[in-house]
Image: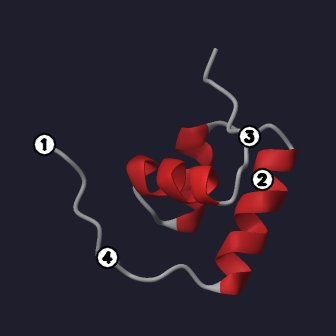
Amino acid sequence: MAKKFERHRQAWTPSEIAQLRLMAGKSMSLKTIATSLTRSEESVKKQAKIEKLKISKAR
């Protein structure tokens, strides 16, 4: 069963985007970033693409 996200369709705040940039810069995995931001992996992936960030693949 998929996780239920309470923050469904919530806009990204500037502080969340800053955290996303920081974590992506540290080469954290998509799953780790999504969990710490309480966002879905798809949401993080989409926002990273908008911000032109690369998210490292889990190894």
Dots 4 and 1: beta carbons under 8 Å? no
Seen from this angle, which residue lies furthest top? 59
Q: Is residue 56 left or right of residue 38?
A: right
Kind of residue at badge 2: Met
The span from disc 4 to disc 1 (Cα, nearest Å) is 20 Å
The span from disc 1 to disc 2 (Cα, nearest Å) is 27 Å
Give the residue pinned by disc 4: 9
Residue 22 x/y as whole percent: 83, 59
Give the residue pinned by disc 2: 23
- Residue 13 or residue 38, whichever sits in front: 13
Give the residue pinned by disc 1: 1
Quarter containing the N terminus: top left
Quarter containing the C terminus: top right
Kind of residue at badge 4: Arg
Q: Label 4 neighbourhood size at 10 Å, few (<14), some (14-19), many (20+)? A: few
The span from disc 3 to disc 2 (Cα, nearest Å) is 6 Å
- Residue at left 70%, top 30%? 56
Vertical placement of 10 versus 37: above or below? below
For marks 4 and 2 on the same chain, the one whose residue lies earlier in the sequence: 4
The quarter of the picture where residue 6 lies is: bottom left
The span from disc 4 to disc 2 (Cα, nearest Å) is 21 Å
Vertical placement of 40 versus 37: above or below? above
- Residue at left 57%, top 66%? 37
For marks 4 and 1 on the same chain, the one whose residue lies earlier in the sequence: 1
Give the residue pinned by disc 3: 28
